[in-house]
């Protein structure tokens, strides 16, 4: 199987481990990810808040390129996904490539959770995750707004939870799956961001989670990098925040998994080693 | 019986009522009681509907089941109601008066006529599903009775179809059934279920290729259930105990059968044929039986002892098994006198590829190799072994060689993806060190000079195009040939049958693939009498296919030997239950399924494995098996495990029932399909299903119910702790984007649930979060105020957007806006979602099929002045299907629909009803009692606890008992005949049945003895089940002792029973209607159109009442035109006599025979009317306010005055540019603590009219709660959209209206804005209260009660909304309470229907269980007069109390109060009570 792949800026930068784990898992599943040639910014960071046409145009150009590729477009970053999905729903202008033969935009999570790949995944699980207790965290953009994403269960998505069960983890059905982490206010209103992440981390700990599983580089960095600061402010927490693709890679026993996990601020090595999932 | 009898009626005197809820039952009873045949069609297994699920009802807090239960019994036992459960209406053809309805009766799998309701089927049913009745709060079985009091009192089996596992299995294994039995720990039963279809459970539990698992619906969720491992587990458990000897089957057939081959196919056929009574001989060439199982499968996968045990179970049935007996020639068998032969020799010849070198030493073929190892004849392999092929047999060869200590490599010409071996087998082989070489094909086997194998030359392959099997076909890569050194080669590329014993001369044809040619349906070979099955016809296949072929061949041979049709028509199969992803998601959301990967079975370590032939897979432990079994989704619900079939003592179970259709002729149809509660799973933000402590209101209703899952203890589901703080969230599934209507009942039921919860547990603190408190019905506002002020229920006006859960405490967190406007978060122990009503799931498709129009939300469309008439003439609707409403309105509409449905059929009244003929009653007075006692076992319900034979012996020893009998089920049909016969043969004149509850069964037994010629009052019952065996289940001896006490008491009572006779009194077929407004006129026309005389008495000088002041309805229909038409019709009707200026002077008589004196006109002439019934429709009027400058300033008017300005006086209101309306003027006050119900809609109607005339006009409505209930909510939305402003005020801070500089000034404090607002309107409109007409003296004359507010009080607020407690007097319209036009019309029609139940009869029966007065003893103390709730006793001119038997309800209050003992309640005399209590203490 072959699909177009739009990594976006995060996966080439701060979230390289998300990119690498995605590619490794895809390879194991026999999926050929073809990176979109000459892709540009999705417009999530500032364009969509400043200029509607620019926002549509940026996303539209990517869609136009993907249209020429003639394959579904798989998007790992939730913010990119939201922008591209919005452009898929709202017709883009002809200059940006038009709407003809537009590709279907799919989030990486939904793509990997498609029935065929799930079957394949089940047979590739070499080392089930030993009932590692996790909470799945979708954040706001992966499923909402439903008229953009078309998500049926936008209040309580479960795709990631099902993946986690399949690979042997134990997801807890907590109430804060789709609460905002403050990702879009990281630069402008750090005070709000700290409040939001503190609440999420506290609730995850309360739910007994040993790790938070995410599918968005913004959520990951927000939840991962704030923990030290929160600890300094007297709200100690220590919960690794892992990409779901890293978890799948672990369960597949892929050799690069240790390398990806090293890049996290909150080091998951101790936890994973204690479960026999990673060497110390 | 009215109408011209000589003329043949054109209409059909029968009505179909669709839906068996409280509405359907009411309509059915009213119709059946007024001379019409009724077909009551219910989709479910029992009637009772939603009301049966409720705990209490508002506003009286009556027990719901207690008040509905008598209705259930009355409906079911009515001679002229044909109750059709499990039935749906498919189509309706024809037209009003003459419809043909096509019905579909769904199979119930239990014969209602035979079922006694004992419940043993449910006790043995292993399938557990979320309980329907308790809304999933408790579990039920696939065999179930909906609820304990369900009517009909019969069980049903829920079967959705065939589970996909069973469908996928060639031999139809009922996997779901044995899995359920494993979960219950019933391993013997599980094995029985497997063996229904498969004699080799231990074998298939190990080596089956389990296509069931491929088909498993659970794959959509996570992974298939490990069905094979569970099957093996069953045998592991059962085979732990020594094998029990098998009883041989008696040979009953003459013809003899020979079977060639003792493999799985041959032995299966042998078992089936022996069981059919044939002498069967099996010929086997090997020294062991079991075929390929025994010699083809290695010991480490299938231990020999399992095979031997399962073979022995077959052989011991009486099979003549001859080992070491190869059949040389088929003809020999016929010569030996066999009548039919089955060839089932399997495929034991391994195939060798046609390449050079296969004749070298060290080259083996799979079947021979494996057989030799198994039989102990193992060849000496070299140290390096190559196995060619990658099927299951190849894995067997490779892993066997590993265990012989060899280095083993597999070579396969395709890739792992194409390998046919089980994936787990490949994995195990890899683990054991077998090396896999894919895309590698042998070209030549190389040998040394001593012809010993030295190696194999392989060529590399690549995959090309798909071949005919769909797999990619491998192509050699040029130049890739190479040699792999080895010492032995085993070919495992296929097997085929050895057919040397079938020379061409015997006439059995073969195929090109060297298999026996057979008809695939019958397995008959080309020679008559010869059959073939298994691998010999199919080529190599799996065990389960051989089993299937064995079964089919056996039944085909049976047909052949019996000379029957060889290919009979097949029964229509059940659907296969394949889940969709949505269904799975739904189960997950409802917490009915949890994500859980399959349980992994333990295996020997690699190290242990390669050293021995010990079984590799260790099987499940008990815990593992139950955990895995619990993963089954029970797809088909009933699995046909047949546990119930074997258990049922009356043969009521029939799993072969099929659907059937039926056509019924009726004159009218009434639709009462009811509603579903909104499935709040869809409102994911509230977490229903996900959070255990969030429940919907109906679930909470079940929690409150004494018969519910917690026996009425208020507990939260997560930890069974009593909750302290409970939050009720209103408008879940109402007043939202998908459901823009108000469900009309939730405010009240939430208030009720909060009150009842507090009554159960004073520590509970309920909070109700709401938008508007819609307490608009009769007595509702007072109820709401009591909840607030007396019961401590907290009401919080705030819409809650989501519920979060504290994962540790399972408490629920709710954010809301407090009084100061701040957002606060509060934790609750339990959250109840006040879910709205949606039309029932099936009603919209029904409406489509029968061409009845619906609104966009699925409610049926009816007219403003014909609220019960659907778009199709002759078809009527009532209840929630017509719009959200509560019970009394549903009941009123149901009666109304009955009246409407029967009006056109009045000619045909009495033409389709049956009257029962009885034999003359025997005279028993003066005879000594001869008592017969019948004791019931109720299956094991009583018999398993109480010593029934001992009890029967005891009963026989009691005085006057001349006959006793014990029955398995005393209520079964055949036992009724036994009882009648016993009455006859033993001259019984009293009958006692000791069984269950008189509530359900007394009428049945009374009927039985009446058919035997005994008066029904000569019957007595002892409840030794519900009140004895059920409650003392664990104390058998004490229960038996108590049963004796109960029987002794019943016998003592029976001695003193006497026949009671009822008298007939004629009925005056005329109705008196008091009040000539909308309701009175409507009722008059209704009764007159039904063919009865009517006297309509109006107090005023003209007809019309309050309706004269109303001009339009909310939907814009012209009211005045309608009113004039009605007046014209009433005045012109030949059967209606209108008397104006009339008032009631005196009233006397009883139902059927009333006499009323009316005073007419200013001259006060008197007029006497004789009538059989009376309908009170005295109406109400608009209050003249005394506040807000009303009457002081002409710019302050009431709504009715505004309406006249808008529509009558030339539209003067168009001049107003700003209008303020004030709601609740004179309503919801201390003086009038009721809601006037109509004013919100009236205000919205007039406001919209103002806006229509002048869109820029500003209209402001000041309100406390906008009570736009039901479908009115949509009009409320329309008003908001039209720009009408709605501003709320608090009851404590009412608006103030004053004059400032000649301008009107309206000031109020807005709690929403937190500040004062003021308006300067041109007009202030007061929504003044509705007050009842002055009816004090009328109530005195009729002796009927009124509420403190002056409205008339009905007999029962829920189920008798238009009846008075006094029989024959009814009420309708605003006399009852304020209501809308369509509601008045429904009630008027209801009163007509109720009246018809009296007027349609020629005479009424009085007497029976009534009180009688011994006038000699009466001291005229008036005790009885005061105590009677029905105002029946009077002190007559002789100075003694007199009780009119026609009025007496038989409650017995007077008898118990009478100080002189002058009053006796017949059938419950003092003598009887004394004798009964005496008997108790004698024991």
Image (spheres, grey):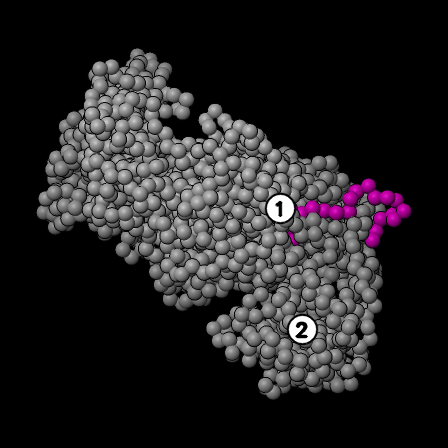
Q: For this view, does B1230 lie left or right of residue B352? A: right
Q: Is residue B38 above or below residue A151?
A: below
Mark 1 — residue? Answer: B255
- Tag 2 or tag 1, which sits nearer the N-term? 1
Q: Which residues are magenta?
A: B1-25
- Residue B965 tag number: 2
Q: Nearer the viewer, residue B386 or B849?
A: B386
Marks 1 and 2 belong to one chain = yes
B451 within the magenta span:
no
What's the residue at 46%, 56% (across, down)?
A: B189
Q: For this view, does B193 lie left or right of residue B34? A: left
Q: Is residue B449 above or below residue B871?
A: above
Q: Are marks 1 and 2 in contact (CB under 8 Å)?
A: no
Q: Nearer the viewer, residue B641 or B201?
A: B201
Say few, some or many: other residues with alpha carbon within 10 Å of mark 2 (under 14 / 14 to 19 / 20 or more): many
Residue B991, given in percent of the width and then of the height, sits at: 71, 74
Q: Is residue B1278 above or below residue B198?
A: above
């Amino acid at each position: 199987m072959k699909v177009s792949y739009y990594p976006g800026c995060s996966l080439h930068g701060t979230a390289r481990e998300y990119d690498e784990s995605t590619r490794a898992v895809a390879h194991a599943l026999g999926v050929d990810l073809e990176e979109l040639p000459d892709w540009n910014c999705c417009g999530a960071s500032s364009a969509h808040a400043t200029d509607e046409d620019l926002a549509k145009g940026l996303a539209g150009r990517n869609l136009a390129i993907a249209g020429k590729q003639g394959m579904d477009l798989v998007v790992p970053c939730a913010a990119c996904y939201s922008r591209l999905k919005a452009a898929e729903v709202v017709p883009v202008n002809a200059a940006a490539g038009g709407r003809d033969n537009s590709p279907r935009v799919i989030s990486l999570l939904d793509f990997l959770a498609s029935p065929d790949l799930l079957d394949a995944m089940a047979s590739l699980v070499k080392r089930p995750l030993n009932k590692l207790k996790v909470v799945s965290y979708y954040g706001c953009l992966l499923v909402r707004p439903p008229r953009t994403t078309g998500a049926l269960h936008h209040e309580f998505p479960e795709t990631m939870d099902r993946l986690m069960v399949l690979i042997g983890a134990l997801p807890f059905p907590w109430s804060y799956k789709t609460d905002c982490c403050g990702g879009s206010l990281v630069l402008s209103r750090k005070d709000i961001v700290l409040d939001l992440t503190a609440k999420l981390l506290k609730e995850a700990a309360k739910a007994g989670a040993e790790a938070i599983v995410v599918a968005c580089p913004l959520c990951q960095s927000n939840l991962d990098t704030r923990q030290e600061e929160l600890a300094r402010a007297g709200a100690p927490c220590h919960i690794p925040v892992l990409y779901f693709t890293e978890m799948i890679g672990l369960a597949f026993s892929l050799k690069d998994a240790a390398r990806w996990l090293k890049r996290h601020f909150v080091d998951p090595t101790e936890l994973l080693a204690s479960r026999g999932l990673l060497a110390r | 019986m009215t109408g011209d009898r000589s003329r043949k009626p054109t209409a059909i005197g029968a009505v179909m009522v669709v839906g068996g809820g409280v509405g359907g039952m009411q309509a059915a009873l009213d119709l059946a009681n007024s001379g019409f045949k009724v077909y009551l069609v219910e989709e479910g297994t029992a009637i009772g509907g939603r009301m049966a699920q409720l705990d209490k009802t508002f506003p009286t807090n009556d027990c719901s089941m207690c008040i509905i239960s008598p209705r259930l019994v009355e409906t079911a036992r009515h001679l002229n109601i044909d109750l059709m459960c499990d039935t749906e209406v498919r189509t309706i053809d024809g037209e009003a008066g003459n419809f043909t309805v096509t019905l579909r009766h769904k199979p119930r799998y239990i014969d209602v006529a035979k079922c006694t309701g004992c419940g043993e089927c449910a006790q043995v049913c292993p399938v557990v599903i979320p309980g329907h009745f308790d809304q999933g709060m408790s579990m039920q079985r696939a065999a179930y009775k909906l609820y304990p009091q369900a009517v009909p009192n019969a069980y049903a089996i829920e079967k959705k179809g065939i589970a996909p596992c069973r469908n996928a299995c060639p031999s139809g294994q009922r996997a779901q059934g044995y899995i359920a039995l494993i979960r219950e720990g019933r391993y013997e039963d599980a094995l029985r279920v497997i063996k229904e279809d498969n004699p080799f459970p231990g074998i298939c539990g190990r080596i089956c290729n389990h296509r069931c698992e491929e088909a498993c619906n659970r794959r959509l969720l996570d992974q298939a259930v490990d069905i094979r491992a569970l099957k093996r587990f069953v045998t592991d458990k059962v085979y732990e105990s020594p094998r029990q000897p098998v009883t041989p089957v008696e040979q009953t057939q003459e013809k003899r059968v020979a079977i060639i081959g003792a493999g799985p196919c041959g032995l299966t056929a042998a078992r089936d044929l022996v069981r059919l009574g044939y002498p069967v001989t099996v010929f086997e060439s090997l020294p062991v039986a079991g075929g390929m199982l025994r010699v083809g499968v290695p010991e480490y996968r299938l231990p020999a002892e399992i095979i031997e045990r399962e073979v022995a179970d077959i052989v011991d049935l009486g099979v003549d098994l001859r080992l070491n007996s190869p059949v040389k020639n088929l003809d020999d068998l016929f010569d030996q006198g066999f009548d039919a032969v089955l060839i089932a020799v399997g495929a034991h010849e391994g195939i060798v590829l046609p390449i050079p070198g296969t004749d070298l030493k060290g080259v083996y073929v799979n079947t021979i190799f494996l057989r030799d190892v198994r039989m102990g004849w193992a060849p000496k392999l070299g140290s390096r072994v190559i196995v060619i092929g990658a099927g299951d047999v190849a894995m067997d060869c490779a892993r066997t060689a590993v265990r012989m200590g060899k280095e083993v490599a597999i070579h396969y010409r395709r890739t792992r993806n194409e390998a046919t071996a089980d994936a787990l087998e490949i994995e195990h082989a890899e683990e054991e060190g077998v090396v896999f070489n894919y895309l590698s094909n042998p070209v030549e086997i190389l040998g040394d000079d001593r012809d010993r194998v030295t190696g194999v030359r392989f060529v590399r392959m690549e995959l090309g195009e798909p071949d005919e099997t769909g797999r990619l076909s491998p192509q050699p890569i040029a130049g890739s040939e190479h040699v792999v050194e080895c010492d032995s080669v085993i070919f495992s590329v296929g097997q085929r049958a050895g057919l040397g014993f079938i020379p061409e001369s015997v006439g059995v044809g073969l195929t090109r693939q060297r298999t026996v040619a057979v008809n695939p349906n019958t397995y008959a070979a080309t020679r008559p009498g010869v059959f073939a099955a298994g691998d010999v016809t199919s080529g190599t296949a799996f065990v389960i296919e051989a089993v299937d072929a064995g079964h089919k061949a056996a039944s085909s041979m049976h047909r052949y030997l019996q000379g029957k049709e060889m290919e009979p028509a097949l029964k229509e199969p059940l659907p296969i239950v394949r889940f969709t992803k949505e269904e799975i998601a739904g189960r997950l959301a409802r917490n009915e399924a949890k994500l859980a990967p399959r349980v992994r079975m333990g295996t020997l370590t690699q190290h242990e494995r390669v050293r021995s032939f010990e079984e590799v897979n260790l099987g499940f432990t008990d815990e593992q098996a139950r955990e895995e079994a619990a993963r089954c989704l029970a797809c088909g619900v009933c699995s046909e495990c047949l546990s119930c079939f074997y258990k049922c003592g009356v043969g009521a179970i029939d799993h072969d029932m099929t659907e059937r259709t039926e056509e019924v002729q009726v004159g009218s149809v009434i639709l009462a399909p009811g509603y579903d509660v909104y499935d709040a799973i869809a409102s994911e933000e509230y977490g229903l299903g996900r959070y255990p402590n969030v429940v919907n209101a109906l679930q909470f209703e079940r929690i409150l119910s004494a018969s519910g899952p917690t026996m009425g203890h208020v507990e939260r589901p997560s930890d069974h702790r009593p909750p302290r703080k409970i939050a009720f969230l209103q408008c879940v599934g109402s007043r939202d984007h998908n459901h823009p209507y108000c469900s009309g009942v939730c405010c009240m039921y939430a208030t009720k649930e909060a009150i009842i919860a507090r009554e159960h547990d004073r520590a509970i603190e309920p909070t109700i979060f709401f938008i508007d408190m819609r307490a608009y019905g009769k007595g509702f506002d007072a109820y709401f105020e009591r909840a607030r002020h007396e019961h401590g229920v907290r009401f919080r006006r705030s819409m809650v957007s989501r519920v979060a859960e504290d994962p540790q405490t399972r408490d629920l967190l709710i954010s809301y806006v407090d009084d100061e406007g701040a957002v606060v978060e509060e934790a609750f122990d339990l959250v109840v979602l006040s879910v709205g009503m949606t039309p029932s799931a099936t009603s919209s498709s029904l409406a489509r099929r029968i061409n009845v129009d619906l609104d966009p939300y699925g409610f049926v469309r009816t007219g403003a002045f014909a609220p019960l008439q659907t778009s199709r003439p002759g078809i009527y609707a009532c209840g929630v299907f017509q719009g959200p409403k509560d019970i009394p309105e549903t009941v009123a509409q149901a009666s109304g629909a009955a009246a409407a449905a029967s009006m056109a059929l009045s000619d045909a009244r009495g033409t389709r009803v049956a009257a029962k003929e009885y034999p003359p009653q025997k005279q028993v007075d003066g005879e000594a009692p001869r008592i017969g006692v019948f004791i019931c076992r109720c299956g094991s319900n009583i018999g398993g606890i109480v010593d029934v034979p001992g009890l029967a012996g005891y009963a026989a020893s009691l005085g006057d008992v001349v006959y006793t009998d014990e029955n398995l089920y005393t209520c079964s049909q055949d036992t009724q005949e036994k009882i009648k016969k016993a009455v006859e043969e033993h001259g019984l004149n009293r009958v006692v049945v000791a069984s269950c509850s008189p509530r359900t069964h007394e009428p049945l037994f009374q009927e039985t003895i009446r058919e035997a010629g005994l008066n029904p009052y000569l019957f007595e019952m002892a409840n030794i089940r519900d009140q004895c065996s059920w409650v003392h289940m664990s104390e058998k001896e004490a229960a038996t002792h108590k049963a004796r006490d109960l029987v002794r008491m019943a016998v003592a009572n029976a001695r003193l029973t006497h026949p009671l006779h009822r008298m007939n009194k004629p009925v005056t077929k005329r109705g008196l209607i008091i009040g000539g407004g909308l309701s009175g006129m409507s009722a008059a026309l209704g009764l007159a159109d039904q063919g009865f005389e009517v006297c309509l008495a109006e107090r005023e000088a003209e007809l019309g009442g309050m309706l004269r002041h109303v001009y339009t309805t909310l939907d814009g229909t012209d009211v005045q035109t309608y009113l004039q038409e009605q007046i014209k019709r009433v005045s012109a009707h030949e059967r209606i006599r209108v008397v104006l200026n009339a008032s009631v002077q005196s009233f006397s008589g009883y139902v059927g025979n009333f006499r009323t004196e009316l005073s007419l006109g200013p001259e006060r002439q008197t007029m006497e009317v004789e009538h059989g019934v009376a309908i009170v429709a005295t109406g109400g009027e608009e209050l003249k306010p005394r506040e807000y400058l009303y009457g002081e300033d002409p710019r302050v008017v009431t709504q009715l005055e505004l309406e006249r300005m808008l529509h009558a006086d030339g539209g003067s209101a168009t001049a107003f540019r700003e209008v303020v309306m004030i709601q609740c003027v004179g309503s919801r006050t201390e003086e009038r603590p009721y809601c006037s119900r109509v004013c919100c809609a009236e205000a919205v109607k007039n406001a919209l009219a103002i806006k229509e005339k002048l869109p820029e006009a500003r209209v402001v409505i000041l309100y406390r709660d906008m009570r736009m209930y039901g479908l009115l909510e949509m009009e409320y939305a329309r008003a908001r959209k039209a720009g009408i402003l709605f501003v709320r005020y608090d009851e404590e801070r009412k608006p103030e209206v004053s004059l400032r500089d000649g301008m009107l000034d309206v000031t109020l404090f807005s709690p929403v804005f937190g500040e004062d607002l003021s308006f300067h309107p041109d007009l202030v409109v007061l929504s003044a209260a509705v007050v009842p007409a002055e009816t004090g003296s009328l109530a005195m004359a009729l002796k009927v009660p009124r509420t403190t507010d002056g409205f008339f009080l009905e007999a029962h607020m829920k189920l008798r909304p238009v009846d008075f407690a006094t029989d024959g007097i009814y009420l309708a319209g605003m006399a009852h309470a304020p209501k809308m036009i369509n509601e008045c019309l429904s009630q008027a029609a209801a009163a007509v229907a109720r009246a018809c139940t009296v007027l349609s009869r020629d005479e009424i029966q009085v007497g029976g269980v009534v009180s009688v007065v011994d006038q000699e003893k009466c001291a005229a103390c008036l005790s009885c007069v005061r105590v009677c709730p029905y105002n029946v006793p009077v002190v007559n001119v002789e100075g003694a109390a007199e009780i009119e038997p026609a009025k007496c309800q038989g409650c017995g209050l007077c008898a118990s109060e009478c100080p002189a003992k002058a009053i006796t309640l017949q059938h419950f005399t003092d003598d009887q009570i004394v004798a009964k209590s005496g008997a108790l203490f004698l024991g």
